[in-house]
Image (tube, rainbow, N blue to C red):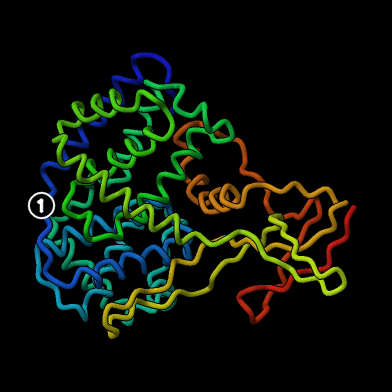
Amino acid sequence: MKFPGPLENQRLSFLLEKAISREAQMWKVNVPKMPTNQRDEVIQWLAKLKYQFNLYPETLALASSLLDRFLATVKAHPKYLSCIAISCFFLAAKTVEEDEKIPVLKVLARDSFCGCSSSEILRMERIILDKLNWDLHTATPLDFLHIFHAIAVSTRPQLLFSLPKLSPSQHLAVLTKQLLHCIACSQLLQFKGSMLALAMVSLEMEKLIPDWLPLTIELLQKAQMDSSQLIHCRELVAHHLSTLQSSLPLNSVYVYRPLKHTLVTCDEGVFRLHPSSVPGPDFSKDNSKPEVPVRSTAAFCHHLPAASGCKHTSAKRKVEEMEVDDFYDGIKRLYNEDNGSENVGSVCGTDVSRQEGHASPCPPLQPVSVM
């Protein structure tokens, strides 16, 4: 997706108008019919499955939208929630993904630990389709995020000047990660997806450019939204994203050296991990939350002598780069960016590989020789 010229701006305006119209037809005010924490847990579980099966962010966004639309039309018993969620996930995958990426139903039922069989998923899938009138093409918050971000970059080319190392698609990948974190929050269901996306873009623009307010007002008018609702949504989104930032793990390991009695830090070195299975949501515990979704990459640090020439980068920056890799791979096609992503599987030029079949989820560090 390129940004020069008025034709592209007209195209973006048309896409926004069409998405707003579609959303107005489909969206209903959320009236919780079950404990909200159970809904949030099941969305977090679907986020884990997205990572496990290496699917697009759009699949998770559509699955969440289908789940919320279905729960708004029927009063579902909590014991059926995991079956409903996995059926919505399967429907979203068949709608969004390429044929070769769609999970095999038997494998999905087995590896997701959803507690239901393939035939039960198919029966629930038919019930969901009937209740939704076989109409799965709805405008998701992620669709609006793409549109608002493209408009912002096209009208304010200086938006990313303060982030010279990020391309537009990489910046969108960061916002996508934040949005997927927000859709698992029932408190934000009171807002339309377009409002949620605009609130996120507005908060990001406030950090990057001084004239963020006029652009926010311009987008607000294009989307025909209420300014007071946007202010309220911004406050809730900012609070929710602050919990995400505070939960980020430190990207360094302190290694104790008995001979010198010193603590050293190194933030280089990455292993690629691919989890083999994800347990289903557990609703038997009161107010319990599932584990944080397992990322497809995890960083481990190994101490190297100072003479090896390792460049110490910001820990926070490194974490952000790793966590958006998966989103970037799926988003860069929108911006015609064909350059391959960085190879992050080495330590100071020396490759470090994981041992296949190791029982521990954290593979041991291999001996490193400095070239």
Q: Pointer 1: residues within 10 angstroms few (<14), some, or many (20+)?
A: some
Q: Nearer the viewer, residue 172 or 130?
A: 172
Q: Is mark 1 on a helix, strand or loop?
A: loop
* Residue located at (71% from left, 48% from top): 312
As drawn, is 367 to the left or to the right of 339? right
Question: Please, what is the three-letter code of the amino acid marked with disc 1?
Answer: Lys
Residue 180 percent coordinates (x, y): 36, 54
Name above or below for residue 258 compared with residue 172: below
* Residue located at (84% from left, 53% from top): 306
Residue 1 percent coordinates (x, y): 43, 29
The quadrant in which residue 205 appears is top left
The quadrant in which residue 198 appears is top left
Residue farthest to the front? Answer: 261
* Residue at image mark 1: 28
Residue farthest to the right? Answer: 371
Name above or below for residue 85 compared with residue 100: below
* Residue located at (68% from left, 78% from top): 358
